[in-house]
Amino acid sequence: MKRLKNSVKLERKSISRSVSYSFATPADKNQIRRLLSGCGLPTLYIHRHLKFFIVAKAAEKIVGVIGLEAYGREGLLRSLCVDRAYRGRGVAKMLNARMMAYAHMQGIDRLYMFTFNAEEFASKLGFHKIGKNRIPKSIRSTWQFQRLKFCPVVCLSKKMNI
């Protein structure tokens, strides 16, 4: 039993070490769309913000993604998704950490995100639930908010440490 546990730990370490992180390129677009679709997330308009997406790759396969839409000093975090085979291995946390550093470099003061089922995970990343009425105009004007404003979506916010 102990050997099995150690084997699983080694396997997880080797998987997490074999993942590399980079900004998305146009060549990544189709893989990103497939991953997002597989996770039940929207793929609309990713081409407009693709240069603000970070991907996690294992070899040439995209196994995780996160995106940012910047609106002045406010940002909308979107499309945080990890392939099921890579969940629980720190990929989402690493994607988030890299995106937080990038958002900080861009001078973003506050991030927002919407979710149906990831509120607990988002709270671990420092996001706090807020009412839809507290979403600023810049974020309310996004297609995501317009599409979700009448849905039971959870709105979250995070003040950046600048």
Image: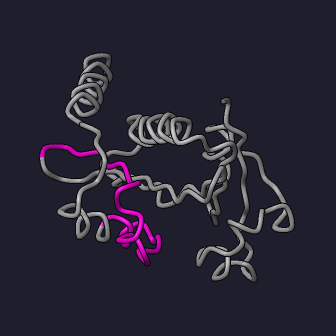
Residue at left 69%, top 66%?
A: 138
Q: Position of residue 9 (x, y in %)?
A: 31, 23
In the rendered view, does 138 fall on the left or right side of 11? right
Left or right: residue 44 versus residue 13 is right
- Residue 76 at what x, y percent from top left? 59, 58
Where residue 81 appears, x then y in whole percent?
A: 43, 56
Image quarter of residue 44: bottom left
Residue at x 41%, y 54% (from the top left corner): 52
**Residue 67 appears in which quarter of the rendering?**
bottom left
Indicate yes or no whether the magenta region holds residue 136: no
Q: Nearer the viewer, residue 104 or 18?
A: 104
Question: What colour-coding does the image apply?
Answer: one colour
The residue that appears at 35% across and 71% down in the rendered structure is 47
Q: Residue at x 68, y 42 (%)?
A: 109
Q: In the rendered view, would you say 31 is above or below 3?
A: below
Q: From which residue to which does the magenta span run?
A: 35-59
In the picture, measured across the screen, residue 69 lies left or right of residue 113, that is left
Q: Closest to the observer: 113 or 6?
A: 113
